[in-house]
Image (cartoon, helix red, strand yellow):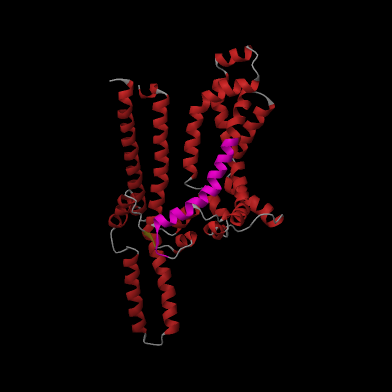
Amino acid sequence: MSARGRIPRILAKRAILLSVALVVIMLLTAVILGATGYDEKILKAIVVTELQAYSQALRQQLKGSGEDIEKLIKEREQFLISYYGLDKPWWERVIPMAFNAMILNLGYSLSEEVANIAGLQPPVRVSDAILITLPRTIIMLTIAQLISIAIALPLAPFIAYRRGSIWDKLSISYAAFTNALPIWWLAIVAIYFVGFQLKIAPTSYRGVISYINRFWEDPFTSFINILYYAYLPIIVVVIGILGGWLYSVRAIAIRVVSEDYVFMAKAKGLPERQVIRHYVLRVIAGPAMTLIILGLAGSIGGFIITESVFDWPGIGLLYYAAITTGDSPTIIGLVYITTLVYIVARFILEVLYVILDPRVSL
């Protein structure tokens, strides 16, 4: 079989393997949620809390006998148990969610916190909550990733070309420092100094919701206000991840600048900028593309702790709300969507590898 004839077969195999990986991840997520009793414990706690509030309200409003009140409380308890699915075994409650998610039937969330982040009233479609919060994460994290890429991609090859220089040492030190420093800690420091002390940035970021929702009513004003809310989170994330991008692209470029053809280009007296552009950047484009595509796909999943610190109403905060309230439909829906995005990105890379470098399929 010719190399061209093998390409569809190779891609089909890799698509099947990636699909199997997706199914396994979904089933493992469902088993972890259900078999460990995690969601059941949280849901029971929610039922107890709601019953306590209901009982207090009844006793204040009704002056009937205690038996009548206890009967109403018992009826309410049965309703809540059925409402949250606690009258079913975990496998009947959770496993079907995983299979339904794989056909994009993500179900409904009963969590008030999840609905609040999405700006809706419970029960809310999980798909709606994800579609509403996803653009907010893109505004914050994906844009920060793009800015970091735009800085690192042209700059790192120059740093690698001058290996051992002061710029090279500074970039390595910066990468080591920021990789050891949690982004959420940077977020806390930034909010304190820039928000509370300098008062040139918000201290609460939930207000961005209204400007995103009303964007098309007044695009210019909405854009300015969204920028006001987003600029500090974006700067913090760029500071936190730029070192990693510089170090990764530099590591790829270092192997290239040591090649004979690069030394030959130097010996010919070609300008440094031309050598880097034509003999380094073009060669590292493939490996760098892998980092870029996977980095952008990963940004869709959000930063749970960082978004929680900023109270930024994106995918990360939605994850946090779903986890803390034991909201299995939302957790499974988020795992499915974020994993699906990553797997699609991987498949795109496989297609590009096979098309651009047929040796990959050998």
Residue 310 seen by the camera: yes
- In the rendered view, would you say 273 is above or below 109? above
Q: Residue at x 34, y 39 (%)?
A: 21
* Looking at the image, residue 260 lies above or below residue 86: above
Q: Residue at (64%, 35%) from the top-left corner? A: 174
Above or below residue 235? Residue 56 is below
Q: Predominant secondary structure in magenta?
A: helix
> Residue 266 placed where, x, y %?
63, 15
Quarter placement of the C terminus: top left
Residue 38 visible in the shown view: no
Quarter occupied by residue 128: bottom left
Q: Give residue 342's position: percent from left, percent from top.
A: 42, 41
Q: Residue at x 35, y 64 (%)?
A: 84
Identify which residue is drawn at 50% across, 44% down: 299
Q: How many marks?
A: 0
Q: Is residue 41 left or right of residue 144?
A: left
Residue 347: x and y, percent? Answer: 39, 35
Question: Could you say which is closer to the camera, residue 359 or residue 165?
Answer: 359
Q: Which contiguous range is marked in magenta?
A: 122-150
As for residue 147 lying within the magenta part, the answer is: yes
Depicted 284 relative to depicted 67: above or below: above
Q: Quadrant of the N terminus?
A: top left
Q: Estimate the x, y position of residue 32 in percent, counting from the top left.
A: 36, 50
Q: Is residue 15 left or right of residue 245?
A: left
Residues 263 and 220: in front is 220
